[in-house]
Image: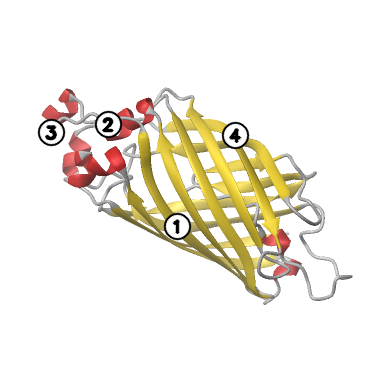
C-alpha cells in the first residue's frame, strides 16, 4: 500500500522546547525487517520477505519509504502550519515474478519485475488533535520503464501520525491503487496461452481500481526517548481488499482471495 511519511518521527518534539532532538537538521534512519504477506496481489498463499528501511532528511531533502521503493521530497518541512511535499518516487513491483506458491498460477508463467518511476505530491496539517500529530494527504503516480507491464499506477493515500508517548509513535494510513489498461492487463488478464498452460478460463481486465486498505505502523524506541535517536523497533499490520477486475480475475476469484493481510517487524537505528 502507498503511504506518505510526511508525518514522520521528526514531528515528535521534547517536552522542553529549548532542548534539541536528533531530528533537528540532517538525520537518517536505517534498518531491516521481515514481512509476511500474500505471494502476489490477490493470492491466498502467504510468504516471508525481507524489508529494508531508509528514511530521513539530508540537506533539506526528505527521504521517505515506499513499498519496495523510496520517495524524495524537495520541499523543506514547514516549521508551523500547512506543509507541502513534492518529488520523485521509484519502486520495484515483483507481483508473480517470484515466490508464486500456487502451482496453477505458477503454470501460467512468471512475470517480469517492473521498475516504476514517477512523482509524488502531498499536503500535511500538523496539530490536528495534539501539538505533535500530523494529518497528511498524498498521491504517487508511477510508470513502468522496465518493459514489464508498461503502464501507469496511481496511488492516493491519507495518513495520521501521532506520538503515543515519548518513546512510542503510531501511524495509521489508508490508501488505494488504480491501474491503467496496460497495468491491469499484465497482472490480471488471463491470455489464451496462459489459459492453456494453467487451465484457468481466459479473462480480460480493463483499467480500474485494484485494491484499497489500511496499515497501522507502531514504532518503539528502545531507550524510551524517540528524540535522541538510537535503536528502535517497528511493527506493522495491515489489511486490503481487492477491487474490480483485480478481484474478479481467476487469479484472485478462483485461486486466491480478495482479502489481503500484511504483518511485519523490523529494527532500525536513527542518527
Left or right of residue 105: residue 84: right
Residue linked to disc 2: 205
Q: Position of residue 104 (x, y in %)?
A: 16, 41
Tell me the CA gap for discs 1 and 2: 25 Å
Q: Are marks 3 and 2 in contact (CB under 8 Å)?
A: no
Tell me the CA gap for discs 4 and 1: 22 Å
Tell me the CA gap for discs 1 and 3: 31 Å
Residue linked to disc 4: 119
Residue linked to disc 1: 214
Q: Position of residue 219 (x, y in %)?
A: 58, 67
Q: Position of residue 177 (x, y in %)?
A: 43, 42
Residue linked to disc 3: 201
Q: Residues within 10 Å of mark 3 (few under 14, many from 20)?
A: some
Tell me the CA gap for discs 4 and 2: 26 Å
Q: Residues within 10 Å of mark 4 (few under 14, many from 20)?
A: some
Q: Earlier in the sequence, mark 4 or mark 3?
A: 4
Amino acid at each position: 500500500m502507498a503511504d506518505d511519511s510526511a508525518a514522520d518521527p521528526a514531528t515528535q518534539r521534547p517536552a522542553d522546547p529549548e532542548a534539541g532532538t536528533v531530528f533537528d537538521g540532517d538525520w537518517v534512519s536505517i534498518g531491516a525487517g521481515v514481512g509476511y504477506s500474500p505471494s502476489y496481489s490477490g493470492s491466498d498463499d502467504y510468504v516471508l520477505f525481507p524489508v529494508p528501511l531508509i528514511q530521513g532528511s539530508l540537506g533539506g531533502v526528505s527521504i521517505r519509504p515506499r513499498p519496495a521503493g523510496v520517495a524524495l521530497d524537495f520541499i523543506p518541512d514547514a516549521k508551523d502550519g500547512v506543509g507541502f511535499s513534492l518529488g520523485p518516487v521509484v519502486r520495484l513491483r515483483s507481483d508473480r515474478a517470484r515466490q508464486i506458491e500456487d502451482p496453477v498460477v505458477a503454470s501460467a508463467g512468471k512475470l517480469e519485475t517492473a521498475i516504476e518511476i514517477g512523482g509524488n505530491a502531498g499536503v500535511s496539517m500538523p496539530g490536528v488533535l495534539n501539538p505533535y500529530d500530523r494529518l497528511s494527504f498524498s498521491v504517487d503516480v508511477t510508470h513502468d520503464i522496465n518493459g514489464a507491464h508498461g503502464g501507469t499506477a496511481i496511488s492516493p493515500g491519507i495518513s495520521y501520525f501521532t506520538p503515543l508517548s515519548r518513546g512510542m509513535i503510531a501511524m495509521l494510513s489508508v490508501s488505494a491503487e488504480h491501474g491503467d489498461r496496460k497495468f491491469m492487463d499484465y497482472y490480471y488478464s488471463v491470455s489464451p496461452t496462459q489459459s492453456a498452460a494453467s487451465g484457468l478460463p481466459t479473462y480480460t481486465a480493463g483499467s480500474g481500481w485494484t485494491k484499497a486498505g489500511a496499515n497501522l505502523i507502531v514504532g518503539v524506541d528502545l531507550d524510551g526517548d524517540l528524540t535522541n535517536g538510537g535503536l528502535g523497533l517497528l511493527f506493522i499490520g495491515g489489511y486490503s481488499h481487492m477491487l474490480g477486475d483485480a478481484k474478479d480475475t481467476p487469479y484472485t476469484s478462483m485461486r486466491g482471495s480478495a482479502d489481503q493481510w500484511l504483518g511485519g517487524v523490523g529494527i532500525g537505528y536513527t542518527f
